[in-house]
Image (cartoon, helix red, strand yellow):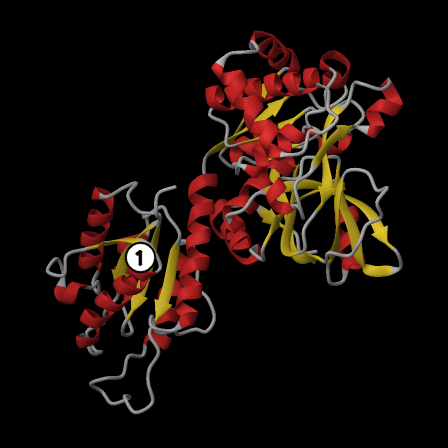
Amino acid sequence: MSKLRFALYFGNRGFFPESLISGARQEIKEVLQKLGYDTLIMNENATRFGAVETAEEGRKYATFLKKHTGEYDGVILSLPNFGDENGAIAALEDCGVPILIQAYPDEIGKMDFQQRRDAFCGKFSIMDVFCQYKLPFTTYMPHTVHPAAETFERHVNSFATVCLIVKKMKRFTVGAIGARTTAFKTVRFDELTLQKHGITTEALDLSELFMRVGDVKAGTDKFTTKRNRLENYTNWTGVPDEKLDMLSKVSVAIDDIINEYKLDCLALRCWIEMEKELGVAPCVLLSELNDRGFSAACELDVCNAIPMYALSLASGVPATCLDWNNNYGNDENKCILFHCGPVPQSLMTAKGKVIEHAMFAKSFGTGCGWGCNVGRIAESPMTYASSKTEEGKLIFYLDEGRFTGDPIEEGFFGCGGVAEIDSLQNKLLTIGKKGFRHHVGVTFGHVAHPVKEAFSIYLGYDLIEI
C-alpha cells in the first residue's frame, strides 16, 4: 500500500508574529517525514510568508489543491499564530478529504507581543466557521500541541487511520455470494441504504460459484498454487485428499470472483448447499482470506463484512466475524466469542487444525463438512463493531475490550476466545434492544477512536453508544 500523503496548510493573521510561520513549515514537514508520511506543500512564495490569511490567499490555496486532486489523503491545518477563518474556509471548503486542525501552544516566557501566538484562541474561530459551513474536521486533546511533542505524533497517526478508512470506504464494493440462508432473518440488509453511503453490493448466486468450481481443473497452475498455499496455511492431518482438492477449487473460484468484480470485502452463504453439493465447509477458506487482509464474513452477513473491513484498515491486522456465544462462568464482564472456523491464523494462539464440521456431520451425515479451522483466539486488546441497515440509515456500534487468554475446555468446538469487556451486561442489553445481530466483527488492538471519527464525522454513518 502506498504511503499516505498530507497537504499542509499554514494559517496566519497579520496582527500576530508571522516570523513563526517559516519554522512551522519546516517543523511539521520534518515530523511527518519521520513518521513515514509524504507531504504536499504550497510554495513559500505563493502567498505572504507561505501561509494563508485572506480569502484571496485562501482561493490561491484552493487552486493549488485542485491541481493536485487525488494526490493527497488529508489536510493538516497548522496554526503557528491565531490564523484567519476567512482564508481557511476559502482554501478548504472543497478539499474533499479529512482535515486535522493543529494549534501551536504559547510558551511561558515568550508571551510578549513579538512572540505570543494566540493560536489557542484562533483555533476556536477556525472550528466555528467550519461548523457554520458544515465542513467536517478532526481535532484532538489537548487543545494546543507542539509538533515536536510525542502527543502530536499520536495525533497524526490516529488522523492517518481516519484518512485511510475514509479513502477506502467512501466508495467500495462488497460481495454477497449466495442468498441469505432462509433460517437467518438476522442477516437481512438493504442494498439501497448501502448504496446511499457509497457501498455497492455485487450479489451472485451460489450456482455461479458452483459452476466456477466445476471449471477449476486439478493440476493447473492456479489449482496447484492454491492447494500448496492452503496445505501450508494450517494443519490438514486426517483430512481426505479429495476434500483438500475440493476446498482448493472453491478457493480459486472465490478469488476469481473477487478479482472479476473488484470486491473489497465479501460475505458468503456457507451452508447448507456447499456441504450437500460439494461435501465441504468453507470456514478455512474464509480464515485464509481474512488472514491475507481480505475481510470475509460467513453466513452472508454483509453488515458484518463492512465493519470487518473498517476494523482491519484501522488496525493493520486481519479482522474476523464471531458470534456472541457463551457466558463465561459467573463473571458478568466476560463471555466467549466464537465461530466455527473463519478466524485468521494471525489472531490465533497457534496454527489451527482442519476438522469436519460437527454440526453438519450431525445433521447430514459424516463426510460432508470438512473445512473447519479450529483452535483458540490469542490474548490481545481488541476492538469490536457491528452494523445494521434500518430506514435508510447504516447504523453501527463500536467498542473496545480484550481477549484474556482464559482457558476454554478442550471439548469446545470451533475457534473461540474469552473476551473481557467493561459493563458487558449493559452493553449486551443495548445490543439486543437496538436489534443488532448475534454476529460481531473483531480485530486486535484498540482502534475505536479513529474508526468512530471516520464513520461519524466523514462517512455519515450513524453510531449508537452501547
Outermost residue toward the front? Answer: 237
Q: Position of residue 3 (x, y in %)?
A: 34, 47
User: Residue 256 appears at what percent x and percent y?
Assistant: 51, 19
Q: Residue furthest bottom?
A: 109
Vertical relation: 5 (above or below) 268: below
Question: Of helix, strand and loop, which one carries label 1?
Answer: helix
Tell me: 279 left or right of 145: right
- Residue shown at the point (37%, 76%) measured from the top left: 120
Horizontal relation, residue 167 to residue 313: left or right: left
**As displayed, is residue 89 above or below residue 124?**
above
Name the quadrant containing residue 149: bottom left
Residue sitting at 53 percent across and 48 percent down? 455
Report the side of 372 relative to 102 (left or right): right
Question: Within 10 Å of the Cα at label 1, are there few (<14), some (14-19), or many (20+) other Cα atoms?
Answer: many
Badge 1 amino acid: Ile
Residue 309 visible in the shown view: yes
| Residue in the picture at 35% in, 71% down | 103
- Quarter location, residue 287: top right
Quarter occupied by residue 401: bottom right
Q: Position of residue 40 (x, y in %)?
A: 24, 52
The residue lying at 32 percent from left, 48 percent from top is: 95
Most foreground residue, 246 or 156 = 246
204 lies left or right of 16: right
Is 434 drawn above or below residue 275 in the view shown? below
**Residue 202 visible at all:** no
Residue 159, horizontal then vertical, whole percent:
43, 57
Q: How many marks?
A: 1
Name the quarter where the N terminus is drawn. top left
**Pointer 1 residue:** 89
Report the front residue among 326 and 365: 365
**Which quadrant: the C terminus?**
bottom right
